[in-house]
Image: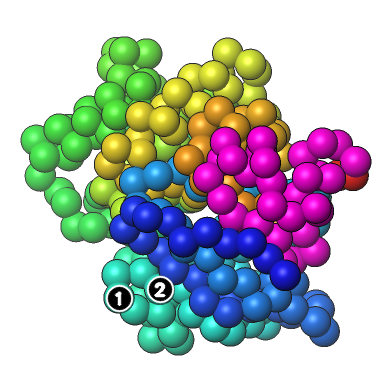
C-alpha cells in the first residue's frame, strides 16, 4: 500500500494509474502510479538509484518519445487533457513543460541566442521584443548581471553554475507552466548549488516545479512536497517536513534514515 496525500492546492498535473515500459523491458518500469502535482509548488522525487524517478520525470514532457518502442499507459492530465494521447503536439508540450538536465547543456552559440532559441521557434522575430524577453529571462534566472556585457559571447565560456542558470533562463523565456529539474546540481560546486536552490525557491512564484534529486537534504530545503519512490512505485507522497520527520510508510522511514539506498 502507498500513502498519497491529496494536496490542497490547485493541481498542475494529475497522474492516474500511470505505467511506463522501456522498449528493452518486458515488465513496466513505472507501475500503476498515481499522484497529484501542486501548482506553484516544488515537488521533489527521491529514492535509490534505479527506482524510476528520472523515468517518471521524463514522462511528463514525453522525452521518452525520442526513442522508439517505449510505451505509456494510464493518464497524465495537464490543462484538461491526457498528454499521453498519440495526437499530443510534443513541441508545444515541451514549451509548456520544460526540462533542466543534470549536466548543463548550453548550445554552441552566443548567450543571447541560447535564450532566444525557443522564442524564435515560436515565431518571435522582432528584435526589440526578443531583446526584452531575453533580458527578462536572464534576470529571472539570476544571471543577468554576469551576462549583460557578454551577450554576444559563446555560452560555453560560462562556468558550470552559470551555464545551468543560462539553461534555466532558456527554459523560462518561453513562459512554461511546469519546469522539470533532473538532478540539476549534481555536477555543480556547493556555491553554485546554493544559487540554483535559491532560484528554484523564487521560480515557484510563477511556475510549478518537479525536481528529481539524490540529495535528501536538498529535497528538504527546496520542496513543498516530496514523493519517495522504490522499484518503480510511489511509496509515499506528503508534505516535505512531515514526510522527513514522521513518514507514514516503513520503507520511507528506512530510506531516509539510511538503512538502505
Contact, mark 1 vs mark 2 (Cβ under 8 Å): yes
- Image quadrant where residue 185 sits: top right
Q: Which element is circle 2 on? A: strand
In the rendered image, residue 63, in percent from the top left (x then y), is placed at 55, 64
Q: Can you see residue 3?
A: yes
Looking at the picture, the colour scheme in use is: rainbow
Q: Which element is circle 1 on? A: loop
Residue at 38% x, 48% y is 208
Considering depth in this image, is 144 or 31 the residue closer to the camera?
Answer: 31
User: Can you say whether 155 is above or below 145 in the image?
Assistant: below
Q: Magenta segment range?
A: 230-259
What residue does disc 2 label? 77
**In the picture, which quadrant includes the N terminus?**
bottom right
Position of residue 228 in the picture relative to residue 168 (left or right): right
Residue at 26% x, 48% y is 175
Considering depth in this image, is 138 or 39 the residue closer to the camera?
Answer: 39
Residue at 44% x, 33% y is 200
Position of residue 158 in the picture relative to residue 117 (left or right): right
Q: Which mark is residue 80?
A: 1
User: Can you say whether 146 is above or below 11 in the image?
Assistant: above
Q: Can you see residue 166?
A: no
Residue at 44% x, 68% y is 14
Q: Specify whether residue 254 is painted magenta.
A: yes
User: Can you say whether 87 is above or below 37 in the image?
Assistant: below
In the rendered image, residue 26, in percent from the top left (x then y), is placed at 82, 84
Q: Which mark is residue 221?
A: none
Considering depth in this image, is 252 or 169 the residue closer to the camera?
Answer: 252
Amino acid at each position: 500500500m502507498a500513502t498519497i496525500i491529496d494536496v490542497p492546492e490547485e493541481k498542475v498535473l494529475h497522474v492516474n494509474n500511470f505505467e511506463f515500459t522501456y522498449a528493452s523491458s518486458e515488465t513496466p518500469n513505472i507501475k500503476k502510479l498515481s499522484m497529484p502535482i501542486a501548482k506553484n509548488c516544488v515537488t521533489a522525487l527521491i529514492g535509490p538509484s534505479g527506482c524510476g524517478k528520472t523515468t517518471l520525470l521524463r514522462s511528463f514532457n514525453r522525452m521518452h518519445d525520442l526513442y522508439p518502442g517505449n510505451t505509456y499507459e494510464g493518464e497524465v492530465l495537464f490543462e484538461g487533457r491526457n498528454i499521453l494521447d498519440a495526437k499530443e503536439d510534443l513541441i508545444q508540450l515541451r514549451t509548456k513543460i520544460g526540462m533542466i538536465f543534470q549536466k548543463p547543456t548550453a548550445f554552441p552559440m552566443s548567450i543571447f541566442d541560447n535564450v532566444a532559441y525557443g522564442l524564435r521557434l515560436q515565431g518571435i522575430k522582432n528584435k526589440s521584443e526578443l531583446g526584452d524577453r531575453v533580458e527578462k529571462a536572464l534576470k529571472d534566472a539570476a544571471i543577468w548581471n554576469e551576462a549583460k556585457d557578454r551577450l554576444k559571447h559563446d555560452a560555453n565560456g560560462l562556468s558550470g553554475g552559470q551555464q545551468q542558470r543560462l539553461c534555466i533562463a532558456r527554459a523560462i523565456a518561453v513562459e512554461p507552466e511546469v519546469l522539470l529539474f533532473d538532478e540539476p546540481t549534481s555536477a555543480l560546486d556547493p556555491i553554485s548549488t546554493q544559487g540554483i536552490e535559491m532560484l528554484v525557491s523564487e521560480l515557484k512564484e510563477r511556475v510549478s516545479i518537479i525536481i528529481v534529486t539524490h540529495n535528501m537534504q536538498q529535497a528538504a530545503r527546496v520542496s513543498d512536497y516530496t514523493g519517495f519512490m522504490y522499484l518503480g512505485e510511489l511509496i509515499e507522497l506528503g508534505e516535505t517536513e512531515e514526510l522527513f520527520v514522521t513518514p507514514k510508510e516503513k520503507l520511507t522511514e528506512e530510506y531516509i534514515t539510511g538503512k538502505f539506498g
